Amino acid sequence: MTNTHGKRRGTRDMFSRQAKKKGVIPLNTYMINYKKGDLVDIKGNGAQQKGMPHKVYHGRTGRVFNVTRAGIGVIVNKRVRGKILAKRINVRVEHLKPSKSRLDFLQRVKSNEEKRKAAKERGEHVLLKRTPQQPREAYILPFKRQEIVQLEPIPYEFVF
C-alpha cells in the first residue's frame, strides 16, 4: 500500500496526548500571557484540532510577533531546500508553551556580572568563559610490593 498524502500523515504519536494527561486541557494553559518578542515552543495538542500548527513546526521554537484574541502569531525558521526561511504562522494557545531555552543563558549572564563586580573590587581578572571538562589529575594506583610475574605465551611446536 502506498503512503497517504494528507496534512496529518505520520502524526499518530506526534499529536497524541501523554499518558494520564488525556481529556480536558488545564485552565492554566489559557492563563499564560504572551507578549511580542517572547520565545515559545510549538507542540501540537491533539485535544484541540482548531489552530493546530502543521507537523513541520512541531517541536520548534519561535518568537511571538502578534497576539490576538483567538490565536498567537509566531515566527519560526523552516528549512526549504537550501535556504532557511522565517515563516509566520498563527497558532492557538493550546499548542504553545513558554520556552525555557534562554533561561540557562540568562542565569549565566547574571552570575557573570556578579563575578565581574566582585573581581573588579578585588582588582583581579576573572575568566568568565565556559571551559570544557578537563582530564582528571594523574595519580599512582596503590599496589603491594611483590615479585613481578611476567606472563608469556607457550612457544609453538609443530608436531608431525
Image: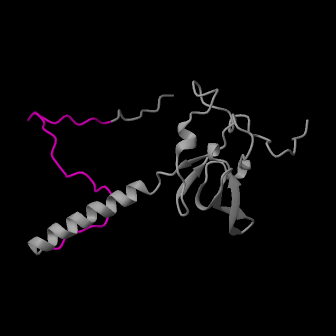
Query: Looking at the image, which residue sits at the far top?
Result: 20
The one of 27 and 103 positioned closer to us in this rendering: 27
Q: Give the side of residue 35 with respect to residue 22, left or right.
A: left
Spot occupied by residue 146 in the image (x, y as percentages of width and height): 10, 33
Q: Residue at x 27, y 64 (%)?
A: 112
Q: Is residue 131 visible?
A: no
Query: Looking at the image, which residue sits at the far right?
Result: 1
The one of 131 and 25 positioned closer to us in this rendering: 25
98 versus 157 height, above or below: below
Residue extent of the magenta highlight: 125-152
Check if residue 34 falls in the magenta segment.
Answer: no
The one of 11 and 69 positioned closer to us in this rendering: 69
Q: Please, what is the dominant secondary structure of the magenta stretch?
A: loop
Q: Residue at x 35, y 35 (%)?
A: 153
Question: Total number of numbered labels?
Answer: 0
Spot occupied by residue 100 in the image (x, y as percentages of width and height): 46, 51
